[in-house]
Image: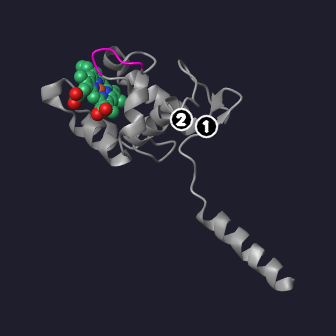
């Protein structure tokens, strides 16, 4: 019996130590501070003029759909380098690190868009529950 308890305890410790931080958190329609930042990066870079204000697609493809297939690495590459011949401009400035979260802007963008694609992050202006 005590062996069983010890095992469960170790398993618990192990899962706490290795639990990954989620990409985004949504609570009562509000999001974590990093995801709100991601939304601000989206607005500042005006991605919506090609991909639609709610990522539904316009001249550029729907990012709701794209983010279901693109890997994280593919996303970073297409954002930074662009696909100039297909009309997607490169955004090298998104490599900049956000001072508050310590994350690159392109990572903040990924979390926000992944949350949108998963249908978890609401459309439009999102607000943080962390302040
Ligand atoms: C001038 C218009 C334009 C702007 C501005 C723009 N995009 Fe794009 N984007 C496109 C087009 C067109 C494509 C499709 C390229 C292709 O077919 O390979 C694309 C492709 C993409 C893809 C790859 C989709 C896939 O399924 O492979 C992602 C991700 C993306 N854009 C995100 C963004 C984000 C985020 C921003 C803002 C930082 C942005 N785009 C700004 C036009 C634009």
Dot label at residue 32: 1
Residue lying farthest to the right in this orientation: 1
Is the image coloured rainbow, by chain, by secondary structure, or in one colour?
one colour
> How far apart are the two marked residues, 2 and 1, measured between alpha carbons?
5 Å
Dot label at residue 99: none
Tag 2–tag 1 contact (CB < 8 Å): yes
Q: Quadrant of residue 50?
A: top left
Q: Quadrant of residue 71?
A: top left
Q: Residue at coordinates 65% horizontally, 71% vertically from top-left?
A: 14
Q: Residue at coordinates 40% horizontally, 29% vertically from top-left?
A: 65
Q: Residue at coordinates 48% horizontally, 31% vertically from top-left?
A: 117
Q: Can residue 131 be seen?
A: no
Helix, strand or loop under label 1: loop
Q: Give the side of residue 12 with respect to residue 38, left or right.
A: right
Q: Residue at coordinates 53% horizontally, 18% vertically from top-left?
A: 124
Q: Quadrant of ligand 1?
A: top left
- Characterize the magenta stretch by its predominant secondary structure: loop
Write the start and end of the magenta stretch as one range. Answer: 56-60
User: Residue 131: where, in percent of width, then height?
Assistant: 67, 33
User: Residue 52: where, in percent of width, then height?
Assistant: 38, 16
Dot 1, crowdedness within 10 Å: few (<14), some or many (≥20)? some
User: Residue 119: where, in percent of width, then height?
Assistant: 55, 29
Residue 110 magenta: no
Helix, strand or loop under label 2: helix
User: Residue 29: where, in percent of width, then height?
Assistant: 67, 26
The N terminus lies in quadrant? bottom right
Q: Give the side of residue 2 with respect to residue 58, left or right.
A: right
Q: Give the side of residue 30 with respect to residue 8, left or right.
A: left
Residue lying farthest to the left in this orientation: 85
Q: Can residue 103 be seen?
A: yes
Depth check: 43 or 111 in front? 111
Residue that carries the numbered disc 2 in the rendered image: 35
């Amino acid at each position: 019996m005590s062996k069983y308890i010890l095992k469960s305890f170790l398993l618990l410790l192990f899962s706490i130590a290795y639990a990954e931080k989620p990409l985004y958190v949504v609570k009562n329609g509000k999001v974590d501070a990093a995801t709100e930042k991601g939304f601000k990066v989206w607005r500042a870079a005006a991605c919506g003029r090609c991909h639609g204000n709610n990522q539904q697609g316009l001249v550029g493809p729907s990012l709701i759909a794209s983010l279901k297939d693109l890997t994280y690495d593919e996303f970073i590459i297409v954002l930074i380098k662009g696909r100039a011949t297909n009309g997607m401009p490169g955004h090298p400035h998104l490599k900049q690190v956000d001072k508050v979260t310590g994350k690159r802007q392109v990572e903040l963008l990924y979390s926000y868009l992944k949350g949108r694609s998963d249908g978890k992050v609401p459309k439009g202006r999102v607000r943080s529950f962390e302040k």
